[in-house]
Amino acid sequence: MASSRTKAGGVIYKHRRGGKTIVSEIRAIHEKARRGLRAATVEAYGRPGAYVSRHRVMQRTNITDVKEFQAIAEYLDREGWITEDGDDYGYFVVTASGIDETAR
């Protein structure tokens, strides 16, 4: 039996297998993105426009895979919560809307 629901414009799927509910990878990514944004806001001392180190955010969130972090950072960038000049998110900026989102 499968069910779905909508959250924040995307669909989050739940599937039942053997009595256990498995929540899709999308929800896990959103949760990691929220943790990453919170960590970046802490590293920026709550100041929009402050540069933040990928390394420090990865430490705070216990994300060890750089590719996973880049995928999360790309999502945050698309949402307008961070911005970055280069292409690897080694250093990035937390935007005012990113600070606001963290406070929600």
Image (tube, rainbow, N blue to C red):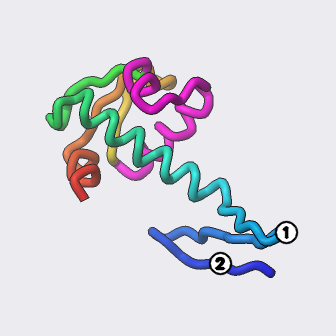
Q: Is residue 68 magenta?
A: yes
Q: Quadrant of the N terminus?
A: bottom right
- Tell me where residue 67 appears, x and y as whole percent: 62, 28
Sequence order check: which comes first, mark 2 or mark 1?
2
* Image quadrant in which you'd find residue 10: bottom right
Number of numbered discs on residues: 2
Of residue 83 and residue 71, the one placed in the foreground of this image is 71
Choose between 97 and 23: the one closer to the eye.
23
Residue 36, percent from left and from top: 41, 38
| Mark 2 crowdedness (10 Å alpha carbons): few <14, some 14-19, many ≥20 | few
What residue sits right under mark 1 in the picture?
A: 18
* Residue drawn where x is 48% and y is 51% of the image: 31
Occupied quadrant, residue 48: top left
In the depicted structure, whether residue 72 falls above or below residue 52: below
Residue 34 spot, x, y in % from top left: 41, 48
Instruction: Please state which amino acid type lies under the numbered disc 1.
Output: Gly
- Tell me which residue sits at (76%, 78%) in the image: 2
Image vertical order of residue 24 relative to residue 12, above or below: above
SS assignment for the magenta stretch, majority: helix
Does residue 16 appear to the left or right of 62 in the view shown?
Answer: right
- Nearer to us: label 2 or label 1: 1
Tell which residue pokes out farthest to the right in this image. 18
Along the line of sight, the residue nearer the viewer: 14 or 90: 14
Mark 2 and mark 1: Cα distance apart in space: 18 Å
Which residues make up the magenta segment?
Answer: 55-80
Helix, strand or loop for disc 1? loop
Instruction: Name the residue tied to disc 2.
Output: 4
Quadrant in which the C terminus appears: bottom left
**Where residue 47 is drawn, which disc sits there?**
none
Which residue: 50% across, 23% down?
88
